[in-house]
Amino acid sequence: MTRPRTVADRLARLTPEQRAALQRRLRHGEEGPAAEPELTRRSGDRSVSPLGLDQERIWILDQLDPGRHTYNISTGLRFKGAFDEEAFRAAVTALVRRHELLRSRVEVRDGLPVLRVSEEFATPVEFFDLRAEPDAVEETVRALVRRPFDLAAGGLLRVVVVRGADDEYQVIETMHHSVTDQWSFVRLNRELLEHYRAIRENRPARVPELPVQYGDFAVWQRRFFTGGRRRAHRDFWRAHLEGVPAHLPLPYDAPPEGRGHEGKHHYFRLDDGLSAAFLAICRARRLTLSDALLAVYVGLLHEETGSRDIVVGLPSATRGRPETHDLIGFLLTNVPLRARLPADPTPRQILHAVRQASAAVADHREVPFSEIVDAVSPERSLDRYPLLQTMHLVLDFDDTVVRVPDAEVHGVEVEDGVSPMDITVGWWRAGDRMYGRFEYRTELFTDATVDRLVGRLLQLVRVFVERPDEPLRARAAAPAPAPARTAAATPAAPVAVDPGELRRIATVWREVLGTEPGPDDNFFECGGTSLTAIRLAHALRRAGFALTARQLFRAPTMRGQLALVRTDSVTSTDGAEPAEGAVSPEQEDLLEGGLPHPELWAHSLVLTAARPLDAEWLAVVVKRVVAAHPGLCSAFRRTDTGWRTDATDRRLWRVEAAGADPARVAAAHRAAFDLREGPLFAASLIPGEPDRIVLTAHHLVVDGLSWQILVDDLDRAYHGGRPAAETRHPSVYAAAWRDHDVRVQRAYWRDQLAGVAPLGCRTGGPDRIGGETAHRVRAAIPPGADAADRPAVALTAVARATRPWFGGRDVVLDLIAPGRELPLADGWDPARAVGFYATSHPLRLPFADDPVRHLRQVGRALDAVPDGGKGYQALRWSADPEVRREAAGWGRAELSFNYLGTLLAGAENGSLFTVGEQIGPSGNDDATRYHAVAVLFETDGEEAVFTWKFDPDAVDGAAVRAAAAGAAEEFTRLTRQRGAQPPSTAGMPLHEVNRMLAELTREKKSPSA
């Protein structure tokens, strides 16, 4: 047996217990036996523990911008060969059972978060078989990894297996960053695959014992960073970062304030020869690869910014204790490394500066980043990450190599479309090869800028190797000295507030801070931290002040916060003028449509929340949204001169019993509606798991696009945003249409309906609303199809499938159109307008044998429609009796087509609310249906959905089902013919990156490697 040849080899062979004993002996020899607390399994109730300090930081960021996927982190494995689904599911179960953190959730107690471990859990594995759609794998993965997590609900590990071919499986693991890091993913995959191998081989898994769980580490970490040790670390970081420039002037293409975190990856690979030469220099100069590559990046930042005082963040594992070596969790902090350069620095001087900077922080690399931020006290901002704008990391590809006997397995890159930092540069080393990834926020940098930066970064590697004493020149002059980071904020002008309210809010502040702050004191200057800001937000809400944590950052004084609360109370006066005026032709058409109970003609959406909701805050949110759209608070009355609309302050808000039936809630909403007095809009919260919201609105005050605006506003307002108030009431737009002269369109509309006759599929029976049934068919949307073409393609498909009902003549149908094309009222914004704007108008569709030619003719027919089709209803309900009589004699179409878009989308876009159910009108069952057959078209992911509605007593059901099947086939055929290839990825394509990873894995596994 060969003995270990080095100290490192010997240390590597120690058991966790032996390593812990050695470390204790070394520490005790330096500092005495009471130097630091022991990291052991805690006794007593193990179901609850505090969050780790770095974990708490990510939780705070999630609270400030909840319901997003900004802090999702994903990795992937690709199996080529055999894959046992049941064994894999059992392996995931074993993994989750072994690590308490993977079955935990975050509870909030008095504004403070704790981890709650559950013994019961569902194995978080989903399987998708995409062998029939291999081109859809990449887009499917992208959508899956962008689903947000709810930390309060748990389920913080998701494993998805996508089968793209008979012998190819892609495993995607997604976790919230608060429960994992890059090193944890390496451990997770090693352990997962060991469990998988053990199950396949019918043996116990060979996994290391876990002396502690993550909760034990969190308790220990909080004990460790207390007292004198905490003060010493804080003093170091306060001195180390004193006077550092407030911001590094990176080559932004847009101002960084108020921007999102959508991101992109630009992959690159270093030339093999240059890579080997760079590594040789590192060995010769006794440099770590991390320091050397960081020096190259610092050189790039100096060239781009002209700065000689540069701070770059380095991720640093907080696994100094051997007991943590095999834990899965967020054991990571950010270390701000400060490099100070001389004028016109050479690569050799930059290497020296980075080496010095790295050595300076060597004893402080495990300090939680929140401790560093609190010590330095930078100015608090929601637009910028504190202290850091850019990160740099170096990983070893050897850590990612895994082995499975009956399949080739290698890691894959997963693009999640997020960049938490402005720029993050990552390098991976595989032997003498190096490749990397430049991650950037797409709202701050263009692809062209990133191409230039990456190109120069690779050139600088060669400069560092070949010309180490050649000075680097900054592209721009050095910026003027920026103000040092400080917590001081510009004092705001005093705002008059109610003294009683001020006393109430001061009481809450005192309870949270334990001090006596004044009305204009900055919360963060009075000892407030990000965590106490979350506590303050919870306490203020309990006291009746509807404020979010984000708002506390924007208004950190009592007076400023009261001003925000006061603004809420006057929001309704800042938007549109009161509604007292004309009704639109579409509204009159509904009111005069012969419904026995028109007040019941309402529609409901049932929204499913991605996380638990605060009822008090939701009530404020609903009030804000309604205030932004005053048309929702309307009433309607008949007068001697026709129908009129009036303003009303009546709306309905309720918190229902837990688990209430949404259909019963919607029915209760409709029963409360009153056309003359209001309300015509209602909202209810149904508490449960999950929480649900039922929104009900009369069709007189909403249409399909209005619903999408309302759901988006509800999401935005719940996160603390303020929906923009409409500046024009729907009645103003209605009055403008009443004044718009459309008499010149009479000939056009008459021609559209010329010769219209009953549909050939009619049976002659009664056509009742209460007898309506729905037949739904789905059609695949080929990859790369242009979304803009879909409505016209679907309309063409329906026309081709229903032509037999028209006796071989032109198809004439009613098209349901948005009705927002003509901005007749100044200041009216169709993208913000909530009301009944949708219109119905006839459209004649000439036939062509060739499907593509037919599609072009449909496109021309759509382009020829005047004023978006609204003129038709304006003529039918004209104030001129002669025009009304003429329009009534034109006849009407019995087939309708309505494009609904993607209303049911939401969860994959990171929304808090998903439309889980729609509840249509009821209570007018005996009324006659307006159209014999109504076709609704919408998209659901990569499928088109056609819903055909009809009364089987009045229409031949077999004919409808045949037409539905034919339309679906025509749609897929036409879409494929119109298909386009998706755009290519900037930089090194993702499939090339994954192909390279497969090659590197094979090389590492080969016997000669």
Image (cartoon, rainbow, N blue to C red):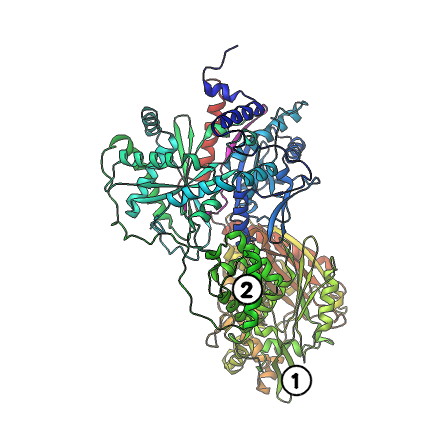
Whether the magenta-drawn stretch holds residue 412 is answered as yes
- Note whether 708 is above or below 109 in the view shown: below
Amino acid carrying label 2: it is Ala
Depth check: give the residue in front, 331 or 517.
517
Q: Compared with residue 114, is residue 627 higher up or lower down, i.e. above or below?
A: below
Q: Tell me the SS state at disc 1.
A: strand
Percent coordinates x, y for residue 836 in the rendering: 59, 72
Disc 1 + disc 2, Cβ < 8 Å = no
* Residue type (three-letter) at the residue carrying disc 1: Arg
Per the image, the residue denoted by label 2 is 506
Position of 807 with respect to 375 (left or right) is: right
- Quarter of the image with the C terminus in it: top left
**Residue 678 picture location, percent across and down:** 67, 77
Q: Which quadrant would residue 760 be assigned to in this image?
A: bottom right
Residue 465 versus residue 830: which sits nearer the camera?
Answer: 465
Q: Which residues are magenta?
A: 404-426
Q: Is residue 847 visible to the viewer in this orientation of the structure?
A: no
Tell me, for residue 638, which label it has, or none.
1
Q: CA distance from mark 1 to mark 2?
A: 52 Å
**Circle nearer the N terminus (1, 2):** 2
Q: Residues within 10 Å of mark 1 (few under 14, many from 20)?
A: few
Task: State the SS at label 2.
Answer: helix
Q: Is residue 73 found inside the magenta-colored segment of the image?
A: no
Closest to the observer, 665 or 962: 665
